[in-house]
Amino acid sequence: MSVLEQLDARGLVQGTTDRAGVDKELSTPSCVYVGFDPTADSLHVGHLLPIMTLRRLHQAGHKIIPLVGGATAMIGDPTGKNAERNLLDRQNVFNNAAQVKEQLERLLGKPADFFQVKVLNNFDWLNKMSVVDFLRDVGKHFAVQQMMNMDSVKTRFSREGEGMSFTEFSYSLLQSQDFLQLFEDEKCTIQVGGSDQWANICGGIELVRRKHGRQVFGITVPLLLDPQGNKISKTAEGDTVWLSWEKTGPEKFWQFWFNTDDSLVIDLLRKLTDVPLQEIDELSRTKFSERLPHRRLANELTLWVHGQRGLDSALWSKGKFDDTVALGELSGFDLHLRLEENLSVIDLLVKLKATPSKTEARKLIAGGGVHWNRQKVEQDFKLKAEDFVGNQGLLSKGKKNRFVIILQE
Protein backbone atom coordinates (compact mmCIF):
# COMPACT_ATOMS: atom_id res chain seq x y z
CA MET A 1 0.00 0.00 0.00
CA SER A 2 1.05 3.59 -0.57
CA VAL A 3 1.58 5.86 2.44
CA LEU A 4 -1.79 7.52 1.83
CA GLU A 5 -3.49 4.13 1.57
CA GLN A 6 -1.89 3.11 4.87
CA LEU A 7 -3.29 6.24 6.51
CA ASP A 8 -6.66 5.46 4.94
CA ALA A 9 -6.60 1.91 6.30
CA ARG A 10 -6.10 3.36 9.77
CA GLY A 11 -8.98 5.80 9.34
CA LEU A 12 -6.70 8.84 9.60
CA VAL A 13 -7.76 10.62 6.39
CA GLN A 14 -10.92 12.72 6.45
CA GLY A 15 -10.13 14.59 3.25
CA THR A 16 -7.39 15.83 0.94
CA THR A 17 -7.14 18.94 -1.19
CA ASP A 18 -5.91 16.84 -4.13
CA ARG A 19 -5.80 13.10 -3.51
CA ALA A 20 -3.70 12.21 -6.55
CA GLY A 21 -1.30 15.06 -5.77
CA VAL A 22 -0.98 14.06 -2.11
CA ASP A 23 -0.44 10.41 -3.06
CA LYS A 24 2.34 11.37 -5.46
CA GLU A 25 3.94 13.79 -2.98
CA LEU A 26 4.08 11.08 -0.31
CA SER A 27 5.61 8.57 -2.73
CA THR A 28 9.00 10.22 -2.13
CA PRO A 29 10.44 11.78 1.06
CA SER A 30 8.52 14.99 1.74
CA CYS A 31 8.03 17.50 4.55
CA VAL A 32 4.74 17.60 6.48
CA TYR A 33 3.63 19.87 9.32
CA VAL A 34 0.85 20.16 11.88
CA GLY A 35 0.19 23.25 14.00
CA PHE A 36 -0.57 23.13 17.73
CA ASP A 37 -1.58 26.37 19.46
CA PRO A 38 -0.39 26.39 23.10
CA THR A 39 -3.59 27.84 24.58
CA ALA A 40 -2.91 25.73 27.70
CA ASP A 41 0.19 24.28 29.31
CA SER A 42 -0.64 20.82 27.96
CA LEU A 43 -2.10 19.19 24.90
CA HIS A 44 -5.21 17.04 25.38
CA VAL A 45 -6.57 13.77 23.97
CA GLY A 46 -8.14 15.60 21.02
CA HIS A 47 -4.62 16.28 19.72
CA LEU A 48 -3.67 12.60 19.54
CA LEU A 49 -5.14 12.01 16.07
CA PRO A 50 -2.96 14.60 14.26
CA ILE A 51 0.03 13.58 16.41
CA MET A 52 -0.43 9.93 15.44
CA THR A 53 -0.73 10.95 11.79
CA LEU A 54 2.60 12.78 12.04
CA ARG A 55 4.10 9.77 13.76
CA ARG A 56 3.01 7.43 10.97
CA LEU A 57 4.35 9.80 8.31
CA HIS A 58 7.65 9.94 10.16
CA GLN A 59 7.76 6.14 10.28
CA ALA A 60 7.20 6.16 6.51
CA GLY A 61 10.36 8.23 6.03
CA HIS A 62 9.00 11.78 5.81
CA LYS A 63 10.34 14.84 7.58
CA ILE A 64 7.77 16.08 10.07
CA ILE A 65 7.39 19.48 11.69
CA PRO A 66 5.20 19.81 14.77
CA LEU A 67 4.63 23.57 14.79
CA VAL A 68 3.97 25.26 18.13
CA GLY A 69 1.79 28.32 17.56
CA GLY A 70 3.47 30.71 19.95
CA ALA A 71 2.19 33.68 17.93
CA THR A 72 -1.19 32.38 16.78
CA ALA A 73 -2.06 31.35 20.37
CA MET A 74 -1.94 35.05 21.25
CA ILE A 75 -4.66 35.67 18.65
CA GLY A 76 -6.88 32.62 19.10
CA ASP A 77 -8.39 30.39 16.44
CA PRO A 78 -12.11 31.28 16.06
CA THR A 79 -12.88 27.85 14.56
CA GLY A 80 -15.67 26.18 16.53
CA LYS A 81 -15.96 29.09 18.98
CA ASN A 82 -19.24 30.86 19.64
CA ALA A 83 -17.69 33.91 21.25
CA GLU A 84 -14.45 35.87 21.34
CA ARG A 85 -11.62 34.17 23.19
CA ASN A 86 -9.93 35.83 26.13
CA LEU A 87 -6.48 36.84 24.93
CA LEU A 88 -3.58 35.14 26.70
CA ASP A 89 -0.70 37.30 27.87
CA ARG A 90 2.70 36.80 26.32
CA GLN A 91 4.37 35.16 29.30
CA ASN A 92 1.60 32.59 29.68
CA VAL A 93 1.86 31.69 26.01
CA PHE A 94 5.66 31.36 26.29
CA ASN A 95 5.29 29.06 29.30
CA ASN A 96 2.60 27.02 27.56
CA ALA A 97 4.69 26.77 24.40
CA ALA A 98 7.65 25.36 26.31
CA GLN A 99 5.44 22.66 27.89
CA VAL A 100 3.76 21.77 24.60
CA LYS A 101 7.13 21.56 22.82
CA GLU A 102 8.35 19.09 25.45
CA GLN A 103 5.23 16.97 25.04
CA LEU A 104 5.54 16.87 21.25
CA GLU A 105 9.20 15.89 21.46
CA ARG A 106 8.35 13.11 23.88
CA LEU A 107 5.46 11.77 21.79
CA LEU A 108 7.24 12.01 18.45
CA GLY A 109 10.89 11.59 19.39
CA LYS A 110 13.51 14.20 20.26
CA PRO A 111 15.43 15.66 17.26
CA ALA A 112 18.70 14.48 18.80
CA ASP A 113 17.50 10.89 18.75
CA PHE A 114 15.18 10.70 15.75
CA PHE A 115 15.94 11.67 12.17
CA GLN A 116 13.88 14.43 10.60
CA VAL A 117 11.71 15.57 13.49
CA LYS A 118 11.86 19.33 13.91
CA VAL A 119 9.71 21.21 16.44
CA LEU A 120 9.36 24.88 15.46
CA ASN A 121 7.51 27.91 16.87
CA ASN A 122 5.73 30.39 14.58
CA PHE A 123 6.51 33.21 17.02
CA ASP A 124 10.03 33.14 15.57
CA TRP A 125 8.85 34.59 12.25
CA LEU A 126 5.45 36.16 12.87
CA ASN A 127 6.83 38.35 15.67
CA LYS A 128 9.36 39.83 13.21
CA MET A 129 6.68 40.79 10.70
CA SER A 130 5.54 44.42 10.76
CA VAL A 131 1.89 45.36 10.35
CA VAL A 132 2.67 46.97 6.99
CA ASP A 133 4.50 43.86 5.77
CA PHE A 134 1.63 41.65 6.91
CA LEU A 135 -1.00 43.72 5.11
CA ARG A 136 1.06 44.09 1.92
CA ASP A 137 2.58 40.61 1.66
CA VAL A 138 -0.23 38.49 3.07
CA GLY A 139 -3.47 40.46 3.35
CA LYS A 140 -3.51 41.60 -0.28
CA HIS A 141 -3.81 37.99 -1.46
CA PHE A 142 -7.11 37.35 0.35
CA ALA A 143 -10.52 38.67 -0.66
CA VAL A 144 -12.76 39.74 2.22
CA GLN A 145 -15.73 38.06 0.50
CA GLN A 146 -13.84 34.78 0.50
CA MET A 147 -13.00 35.07 4.20
CA MET A 148 -16.59 35.95 5.07
CA ASN A 149 -17.67 32.61 3.61
CA MET A 150 -15.54 30.65 6.06
CA ASP A 151 -17.72 28.62 8.43
CA SER A 152 -15.98 30.01 11.51
CA VAL A 153 -16.83 33.55 10.37
CA LYS A 154 -20.36 32.90 9.09
CA THR A 155 -21.34 31.16 12.32
CA ARG A 156 -20.31 34.10 14.43
CA PHE A 157 -21.93 36.69 12.20
CA SER A 158 -25.18 34.77 12.02
CA ARG A 159 -25.71 35.19 15.76
CA GLU A 160 -27.66 38.29 16.63
CA GLY A 161 -25.70 40.78 18.67
CA GLU A 162 -22.42 38.94 18.22
CA GLY A 163 -19.61 39.31 15.76
CA MET A 164 -15.88 38.88 15.45
CA SER A 165 -12.99 41.23 16.10
CA PHE A 166 -10.45 41.93 13.40
CA THR A 167 -7.96 40.12 15.62
CA GLU A 168 -9.70 36.76 15.27
CA PHE A 169 -10.71 37.56 11.69
CA SER A 170 -7.00 37.71 10.81
CA TYR A 171 -6.17 34.31 12.33
CA SER A 172 -6.54 32.42 9.06
CA LEU A 173 -4.08 34.79 7.37
CA LEU A 174 -1.47 34.15 10.05
CA GLN A 175 -1.86 30.40 9.63
CA SER A 176 -1.51 30.84 5.87
CA GLN A 177 1.75 32.69 6.44
CA ASP A 178 2.97 29.70 8.47
CA PHE A 179 2.55 27.40 5.46
CA LEU A 180 4.33 29.90 3.23
CA GLN A 181 7.20 30.29 5.71
CA LEU A 182 7.64 26.54 6.10
CA PHE A 183 7.50 26.06 2.35
CA GLU A 184 10.25 28.65 1.87
CA ASP A 185 12.45 27.59 4.80
CA GLU A 186 11.87 23.84 5.07
CA LYS A 187 10.48 22.88 1.63
CA CYS A 188 7.31 21.82 3.43
CA THR A 189 4.59 20.81 0.93
CA ILE A 190 1.85 19.22 3.06
CA GLN A 191 -0.13 20.53 6.00
CA VAL A 192 -2.12 18.15 8.19
CA GLY A 193 -4.90 19.36 10.45
CA GLY A 194 -8.24 18.49 11.95
CA SER A 195 -11.22 18.43 9.61
CA ASP A 196 -12.36 21.75 11.13
CA GLN A 197 -9.15 23.34 9.78
CA TRP A 198 -10.04 22.87 6.10
CA ALA A 199 -10.51 26.56 5.30
CA ASN A 200 -7.33 27.59 7.11
CA ILE A 201 -5.32 24.91 5.27
CA CYS A 202 -6.73 26.00 1.92
CA GLY A 203 -5.73 29.60 2.70
CA GLY A 204 -2.09 28.56 3.11
CA ILE A 205 -2.20 26.54 -0.10
CA GLU A 206 -3.53 29.56 -1.99
CA LEU A 207 -0.89 31.89 -0.52
CA VAL A 208 1.95 29.57 -1.59
CA ARG A 209 0.44 29.34 -5.07
CA ARG A 210 0.15 33.10 -5.41
CA LYS A 211 3.65 33.82 -4.09
CA HIS A 212 5.56 30.98 -5.77
CA GLY A 213 3.27 29.41 -8.35
CA ARG A 214 3.77 26.03 -6.66
CA GLN A 215 1.07 23.55 -5.70
CA VAL A 216 1.15 22.35 -2.11
CA PHE A 217 -1.35 20.11 -0.35
CA GLY A 218 -3.52 19.53 2.68
CA ILE A 219 -4.72 16.45 4.56
CA THR A 220 -7.44 16.63 7.18
CA VAL A 221 -7.81 14.02 9.90
CA PRO A 222 -11.05 13.18 11.69
CA LEU A 223 -11.89 14.88 14.95
CA LEU A 224 -12.03 12.87 18.16
CA LEU A 225 -15.76 12.61 18.87
CA ASP A 226 -17.85 11.22 21.71
CA PRO A 227 -20.74 8.78 21.03
CA GLN A 228 -23.09 11.74 20.48
CA GLY A 229 -20.83 13.17 17.78
CA ASN A 230 -19.49 16.06 19.88
CA LYS A 231 -15.86 17.10 19.55
CA ILE A 232 -13.68 16.05 22.49
CA SER A 233 -11.39 18.93 23.29
CA LYS A 234 -10.49 21.41 25.99
CA THR A 235 -13.52 22.39 28.07
CA ALA A 236 -14.30 25.10 30.58
CA GLU A 237 -16.06 22.57 32.83
CA GLY A 238 -12.81 20.99 34.00
CA ASP A 239 -13.38 17.54 32.50
CA THR A 240 -10.62 17.83 29.90
CA VAL A 241 -8.39 14.76 29.60
CA TRP A 242 -4.88 16.19 29.29
CA LEU A 243 -1.67 14.57 28.10
CA SER A 244 0.17 15.96 31.12
CA TRP A 245 0.73 13.58 34.03
CA GLU A 246 0.26 16.51 36.45
CA LYS A 247 -3.08 17.60 34.98
CA THR A 248 -4.54 14.15 34.24
CA GLY A 249 -2.79 11.31 36.05
CA PRO A 250 -2.19 7.99 34.29
CA GLU A 251 -4.94 6.29 36.33
CA LYS A 252 -7.61 8.71 35.12
CA PHE A 253 -6.12 8.71 31.63
CA TRP A 254 -6.25 4.89 31.47
CA GLN A 255 -9.81 4.85 32.79
CA PHE A 256 -10.95 7.36 30.16
CA TRP A 257 -9.93 5.00 27.35
CA PHE A 258 -11.09 1.87 29.16
CA ASN A 259 -14.56 3.48 29.37
CA THR A 260 -14.68 4.06 25.61
CA ASP A 261 -18.10 3.33 24.13
CA ASP A 262 -18.33 -0.07 22.44
CA SER A 263 -19.28 1.64 19.17
CA LEU A 264 -15.99 3.57 19.08
CA VAL A 265 -13.34 1.29 20.56
CA ILE A 266 -12.33 -0.65 17.42
CA ASP A 267 -12.15 2.52 15.34
CA LEU A 268 -9.91 4.16 17.96
CA LEU A 269 -7.65 1.11 18.10
CA ARG A 270 -7.09 1.54 14.35
CA LYS A 271 -6.52 5.28 14.52
CA LEU A 272 -4.54 5.75 17.69
CA THR A 273 -2.43 2.62 18.21
CA ASP A 274 0.17 0.54 16.42
CA VAL A 275 -1.74 -2.69 17.06
CA PRO A 276 -1.69 -4.65 13.76
CA LEU A 277 -4.94 -4.41 11.80
CA GLN A 278 -5.34 -8.20 11.79
CA GLU A 279 -5.11 -8.26 15.57
CA ILE A 280 -7.64 -5.43 15.83
CA ASP A 281 -9.97 -7.42 13.60
CA GLU A 282 -9.63 -10.37 15.96
CA LEU A 283 -10.37 -8.14 18.95
CA SER A 284 -13.50 -6.88 17.19
CA ARG A 285 -14.86 -10.44 17.28
CA THR A 286 -14.40 -10.88 21.04
CA LYS A 287 -17.19 -10.40 23.55
CA PHE A 288 -17.19 -6.71 24.37
CA SER A 289 -18.55 -7.58 27.81
CA GLU A 290 -15.05 -8.91 28.57
CA ARG A 291 -13.67 -5.49 27.49
CA LEU A 292 -10.51 -6.87 25.91
CA PRO A 293 -10.50 -4.20 23.12
CA HIS A 294 -11.07 -1.47 25.71
CA ARG A 295 -8.24 -2.73 27.90
CA ARG A 296 -5.88 -2.95 24.92
CA LEU A 297 -6.77 0.60 23.86
CA ALA A 298 -6.22 1.95 27.37
CA ASN A 299 -2.93 0.09 27.77
CA GLU A 300 -1.51 1.14 24.39
CA LEU A 301 -2.36 4.83 24.79
CA THR A 302 -1.25 5.06 28.42
CA LEU A 303 2.06 3.42 27.48
CA TRP A 304 2.55 5.88 24.60
CA VAL A 305 1.64 9.02 26.52
CA HIS A 306 2.92 8.19 30.03
CA GLY A 307 5.48 5.45 29.43
CA GLN A 308 5.88 2.14 31.24
CA ARG A 309 5.90 3.82 34.65
CA GLY A 310 2.56 5.46 33.91
CA LEU A 311 1.01 2.22 32.65
CA ASP A 312 2.23 0.30 35.68
CA SER A 313 0.81 2.99 37.96
CA ALA A 314 -2.53 2.94 36.16
CA LEU A 315 -2.85 -0.83 36.25
CA TRP A 316 -1.82 -1.04 39.87
CA SER A 317 -4.18 1.66 41.14
CA LYS A 318 -7.45 0.52 42.65
CA GLY A 319 -6.72 -3.14 41.95
CA LYS A 320 -7.17 -2.77 38.20
CA PHE A 321 -5.01 -5.83 37.56
CA ASP A 322 -7.05 -8.23 39.67
CA ASP A 323 -7.29 -10.88 36.95
CA THR A 324 -4.79 -12.97 35.00
CA VAL A 325 -5.28 -11.05 31.75
CA ALA A 326 -4.27 -7.78 33.35
CA LEU A 327 -1.40 -9.43 35.24
CA GLY A 328 0.03 -10.72 31.99
CA GLU A 329 0.05 -7.20 30.58
CA LEU A 330 2.29 -5.84 33.33
CA SER A 331 5.49 -5.63 31.30
CA GLY A 332 8.55 -5.57 33.52
CA PHE A 333 6.92 -7.50 36.38
CA ASP A 334 7.74 -11.04 37.41
CA LEU A 335 4.79 -13.21 38.38
CA HIS A 336 5.25 -15.81 41.07
CA LEU A 337 3.36 -18.55 42.85
CA ARG A 338 0.83 -17.86 45.54
CA LEU A 339 2.24 -17.48 49.05
CA GLU A 340 1.01 -18.07 52.57
CA GLU A 341 0.63 -14.97 54.76
CA ASN A 342 3.00 -14.13 57.64
CA LEU A 343 6.06 -14.61 55.42
CA SER A 344 8.79 -12.13 56.30
CA VAL A 345 9.93 -9.75 53.57
CA ILE A 346 13.50 -10.98 54.11
CA ASP A 347 12.48 -14.58 53.43
CA LEU A 348 10.43 -13.41 50.46
CA LEU A 349 13.41 -11.65 48.84
CA VAL A 350 15.51 -14.79 49.17
CA LYS A 351 12.67 -17.00 47.92
CA LEU A 352 12.35 -14.81 44.83
CA LYS A 353 16.15 -14.88 44.38
CA ALA A 354 16.03 -11.09 44.44
CA THR A 355 18.92 -11.24 46.90
CA PRO A 356 21.47 -14.04 47.32
CA SER A 357 21.11 -14.23 51.11
CA LYS A 358 19.20 -12.94 54.12
CA THR A 359 22.21 -10.77 55.01
CA GLU A 360 22.03 -9.02 51.64
CA ALA A 361 18.27 -8.66 52.04
CA ARG A 362 18.73 -6.94 55.41
CA LYS A 363 21.31 -4.55 53.92
CA LEU A 364 18.99 -3.72 51.06
CA ILE A 365 16.08 -3.02 53.43
CA ALA A 366 18.27 -0.91 55.71
CA GLY A 367 19.26 1.20 52.72
CA GLY A 368 15.61 1.90 51.85
CA GLY A 369 15.73 -0.19 48.66
CA VAL A 370 12.68 -2.38 49.30
CA HIS A 371 9.05 -1.27 49.00
CA TRP A 372 5.71 -3.01 49.44
CA ASN A 373 2.83 -1.41 47.55
CA ARG A 374 5.09 1.62 47.04
CA GLN A 375 5.76 2.03 50.79
CA LYS A 376 9.24 1.53 52.24
CA VAL A 377 9.44 -1.55 54.50
CA GLU A 378 11.34 -2.25 57.72
CA GLN A 379 13.37 -5.32 58.71
CA ASP A 380 10.58 -6.92 60.73
CA PHE A 381 7.87 -6.54 58.07
CA LYS A 382 5.75 -9.65 57.54
CA LEU A 383 3.01 -10.06 54.97
CA LYS A 384 -0.49 -10.10 56.42
CA ALA A 385 -3.81 -10.44 54.63
CA GLU A 386 -4.59 -6.74 55.07
CA ASP A 387 -1.37 -5.85 53.24
CA PHE A 388 -2.78 -7.21 49.97
CA VAL A 389 -5.08 -5.47 47.52
CA GLY A 390 -7.46 -7.91 45.87
CA ASN A 391 -5.21 -10.74 47.13
CA GLN A 392 -2.23 -9.14 45.39
CA GLY A 393 0.72 -7.04 46.41
CA LEU A 394 3.63 -5.31 44.71
CA LEU A 395 7.17 -5.90 45.98
CA SER A 396 9.82 -3.56 44.56
CA LYS A 397 13.57 -3.97 44.83
CA GLY A 398 15.23 -0.76 43.73
CA LYS A 399 13.76 0.97 40.67
CA LYS A 400 13.81 -1.88 38.17
CA ASN A 401 12.93 -5.15 39.95
CA ARG A 402 9.23 -5.56 40.72
CA PHE A 403 7.26 -8.65 41.68
CA VAL A 404 3.52 -9.21 41.86
CA ILE A 405 2.82 -11.41 44.88
CA ILE A 406 -0.47 -13.30 45.12
CA LEU A 407 -1.88 -14.30 48.51
CA GLN A 408 -3.02 -17.90 48.72
CA GLU A 409 -6.74 -18.17 49.43
Image (tube, rainbow, N blue to C red):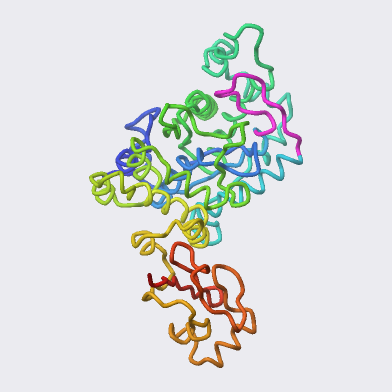
Relative to 2, is 125 on the left or the right? right
Magenta stretch: dominant secondary structure:
loop
Relative to 370, say whether 143 is above or below: above
In front of the other: 305 or 10? 305
Residue 51 at x, y percent in the picture: 48, 44
In front of the other: 322 or 408? 408
In front of the other: 361 or 112? 361
Relative to 6, is 233 on the left or the right? right
Give the residue at the far top of this rendering: 160
Image quadrant where residue 237 sits: top right
The residue lying at 56 percent from left, 53 percent from top is: 105
The residue lying at 40 percent from left, 52 percent from top is: 59
Relative to 397, say whether 137 is above or below: above
Image quadrant where residue 167 sits: top right
In front of the other: 315 or 272? 315
Residue 125 at x, y percent in the picture: 67, 38
Residue 331 at x, y percent in the picture: 41, 66
Image quadrant where residue 238 sits: top right
Relative to 248, say whether 366 is above or below: below
Magenta range: 73-90
Q: Quadrant of the C terminus?
A: bottom left
Check residue 75 for magenta coloring. yes
Residue 87 at x, y percent in the picture: 72, 29
The residue lying at 58 percent from left, 47 percent from top is: 248
Q: Quadrant of the N terminus?
A: top left
Check residue 74 for magenta coloring. yes
Q: How many marks?
A: 0
